[in-house]
Amino acid sequence: MFRRNSGVFPYKTEDHKGLMRFDHRFSDSDSISFRYNATNINDTNEGIGALIGQSRGYLQDFRDHTVLLNWLHSFSPRAVNEFRAQFNHYVLATTSTYPYGPSLDIAGFGAFNRDRFLPSSTLTRRNEIADNVSLFRGKHAWKFGANILIRNVTADSATFMSGRFTFGTLPAAFVNPALAATTINSLQAFNLGLAQSYQQGFGDSIVRATHPLYAFYAQDTWTPFSGLTLNWGLRYERDNRRLPLPTDTNNFAPRFGFSWAPGKDHKTTIRGGYGLFYAPIDFQIDYVVQALNEIDGRRQIAQVLSVLNPAAPTAPSGPINIFSTLRAQGVIGIPTPQRSITAANLTQFGINISQTGPRPPLTVLFRPAPDYVNGYAQQLSFGIEREIVKNLAFSMNYVGVRGIHLTTSRDINLLPAPVNPAKGIRDWGPHAANPTGVGFFVNPLVFQENLYEANANSDYHGLMLEATHRASRRATLHFNYTFAKAIDETTDFNSDFQPNDQTNRRAERALSSFDQRHKVVFYAVLQTPEKTNRLCADFLFTPIVRYSSARPFNLLAGTELNNDRHNTTDRPFFAGRNTGIGPSFATFDMRVSRRFSAGENKKIELMAEAFNLLNNLNYTTVNNVVGNISGPFNLRGRDDRTPSQPLGFTAAADPRRIQLGVRFSF
């Protein structure tokens, strides 16, 4: 299986874009503009590389068509109205390279076969009507507006329907009691058929919804005197959702900003602002709480999830017995799957799939919290820009963003478990304080009851220093440095990113996966003189140097340690979230172009662009499955290890890439 999924595979991309534009001015008071944009993109063998096998790859077909009509009408020089109508048709269809499952996830070694969320397709129609009125009175410029956006979505995602087996590090006692002091890795567990978990869904995968979004705003721009401009306004949004997801009705967003140029020379400008910005709810939340929930006694996609029980590893409905039996029966094909696991295949294990009636054991549910609301960001900015000397400008800007009511998920079927003295952590499995191993589940027969909540937060602070020097008419230099820090409590609302301790989400607050402490960009625009040697004239050179410091990553044990029925969230004992240190990034790009006259009002431009011209090796991801190691946990990726070894690099950014282009202007 590993040999069949390794090597070099063909990769094909087709990208077609089209634009049609029409502008017409009827009179001094009325003008219209019309736009039509079309994009068609087809990709094959997407997503493969490093630890993702070719059989886990996918094919993607993306189509996006947008029509925009804009009408501008002037009632007078002091009153202008803008009307806009926009229609968008968006289709994203994703299919798997291999049509059958189950997906096999071997922690730290590879992921194979059809992804558990594929095939999937999303058809979205977005119809928007907006109107904005601008009024100019003295030193005030008022603006009022409203828009209505109707989003019609049909999503079809075969969620969990491929089936999924995971394999992780296990005590070697599962093989022989005499080996109790050692462990076997996930690859050995796979070869021995010792699956750690099994999950599959059955039923109807289609969810349809129509979500209107209404927005109104009013703002004023006031210039009380020369050099000072004040902006303030208020926006209201209502993002209607389909039950059982509640609709948030109090989304008022005030905003304020100012710009001040003190002194008579106006060489210094001070800017600042504050505002609230609401985000619409991701349709994936709507999909999951419909398809994977229980509504009026019906489970649209009925799920089964079985996790290895150390007290009874060979239980009839356990993942080891299910995997071994179905493989022996030829239902699971290795190295190449030939068919899917059906509900009828599971009855021999006492697992009966039902979308109605009493919940079967091992049921997994996803629900929204009754107080679920739209997330929003509070954004604060302050900056100073100064022309130090002629043609040399320097600016310093601070940006602070606090994310509030961000979406996260947790398992509400878990009660706070006692600490297992042998481990030093909460343990939901059998031990002295929990002899049955089920005493700290609200309902032991429900495997998971995941709740989407809007109570996570994030913080970002960034200081940006920027300098621009126009050395001459043909030479401009630009330098930008950002010093920043990002902290949050969750990476994603996917259940694989739930807390290590589900009853203590506060312990997840740490450096964000997107934290990047230092970022440097330098570029120049250099043009050769017109009157130099004809062979060297009119060349335009644009060198770009970029550097970014490391981002953190989360260390995972790759096995179930606390027996909370979530084997993809466990970290090594006492390890915090995102303590790993990822690779940095550095590259040098160059663009060279030259224009030639091709007749009256006609020009030809030849272009050559090189990305990563020096062919610097930039690693991007690290194998974060490290087992239950002891500290310290501030570990870095290592280039002396293979991708399947803990902390080995698993992927790299693009090598040197050169592209040539021609542009004809007439």
Image (spheres, rainbow, N blue to C red):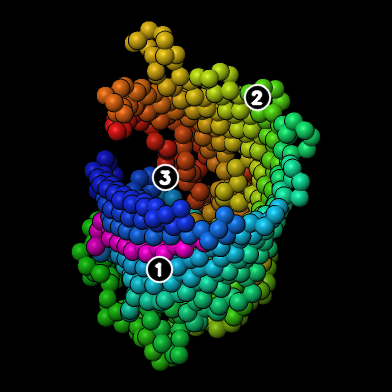
Residue located beneath label 2 in the image: 392
Q: Is residue 85 magenta?
A: yes
Q: Splitting the image into 4 quarters, where does residue 417 fall? A: bottom right
Q: Which secondary structure type mostly characterizes the magenta part of the structure? A: strand
Location of the C terminus by quadrant is top left
Q: Sequence order check: which comes first, mark 3 or mark 1?
A: 1
* Residue at image coords 55%, 83%: 443
Instruction: Give the amino acid type for the residue marked by disc 2 in the picture.
Output: Leu
Q: Which residues are magenta?
A: 81-99
Cα gap from disc 1 to disc 2, whole angstroms? 46 Å
Q: Splitting the image into 4 quarters, where does residue 477 fall? A: top right
Q: Given this view, does label 3 or label 1 mark the residue nearer the observer?
A: 1
Q: Is residue 4 magenta?
A: no
Whole-percent x, y for residue 531 in the image: 42, 10
Residue 644 — which label? 3
Cα gap from disc 3 to disc 1, whole angstroms? 48 Å
Q: Secondary structure at mark 2?
A: strand
Q: Secondary structure at mark 3?
A: loop
Cα gap from disc 2 to disc 3, whole angstroms? 51 Å
* Residue at image coords 71%, 25%: 388
